[in-house]
Image (cartoon, rainbow, N blue to C red):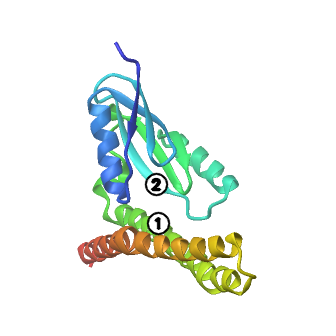
Amino acid sequence: MKTAKISIKWFVDFDKEEKWLNDMSKKGWAFWHTNGVIYRFKQCKAEEFIYQIDFDEKGSKEGVGDYVVFRSSCGDQFVHQWKSKIYWRRETASGPFEAENNISAKLRLTNKAFNYHLNSFIGLTLIAALAFLVLMPMGRHLPESSFSRWLTEFSLGLTYGIFLAELFILLPALKKLHKKNNELIGQIF
């Protein structure tokens, strides 16, 4: 009988990722690690844990340490952190996380996810601008060589790749999170 499992998935929507982790737990697989694509699980009792994904707003290890201590004192278990995502779990018998029934907590998580994706969008846009406005002209103005052709083609490919990623991944994610944010605000008012 297998005691460990690896799954390959990629999520833009943290709600879908969280639901999937909880579905895996219902099947007897406790999540313990990810690199954003490869998820690792250990065998557990079916429905032993429930999971929640949170976001580190500050991006500092020290702030996360204090946050982990605080949440741990509330009965939540820190599982893993990957980039700005913080994975939490608690025993199912302890009841649901606050955000499941609390609109303001859902709004806070949605805002954190929106800011994370927006920062990614801005960072990628800056990289694309650097490639298009600096590297490509540099490649064109260098003496004709295989390196100058490579630099020009690389910068053009990088710019197009980032543009397509933003168009098909980040913008739809931002649009969905913005819509969800407005719906939650509508429920409060």
Q: Of residues 127 and 89, which is closer to you in this image?
A: 127
Residue 115 as seen in the image, left or right of residue 93: right
Q: Quadrant of residue 27?
A: top left
Residue 112: mark in rendering = 1
Q: Give the farthest residue toward the right.
A: 143
Q: Residue at point 54% right, 49% down?
A: 82
CA neighbours of label 1 inside 10 A, class few (<14), some (14 to 19), many (20+): some
Do the residues bearing badges 1 and 2 touch, measured as CB atoms within 8 Å? yes
Give the SS element for disc 2.
strand
- Residue 106: x and y in percent read 35, 62
Q: Secondary structure at mark 1?
A: helix
Q: Is residue 45 above or below residue 12?
A: above
Would you name the residue on which mark 2 appears? 54
Q: Which quarter of the rendering shows the N terminus?
A: top left
67 in relation to 40, above or below = below
116 shown above or below 64? below
| Callout 1 amino acid | Lys
Q: Is residue 119 visible?
A: no
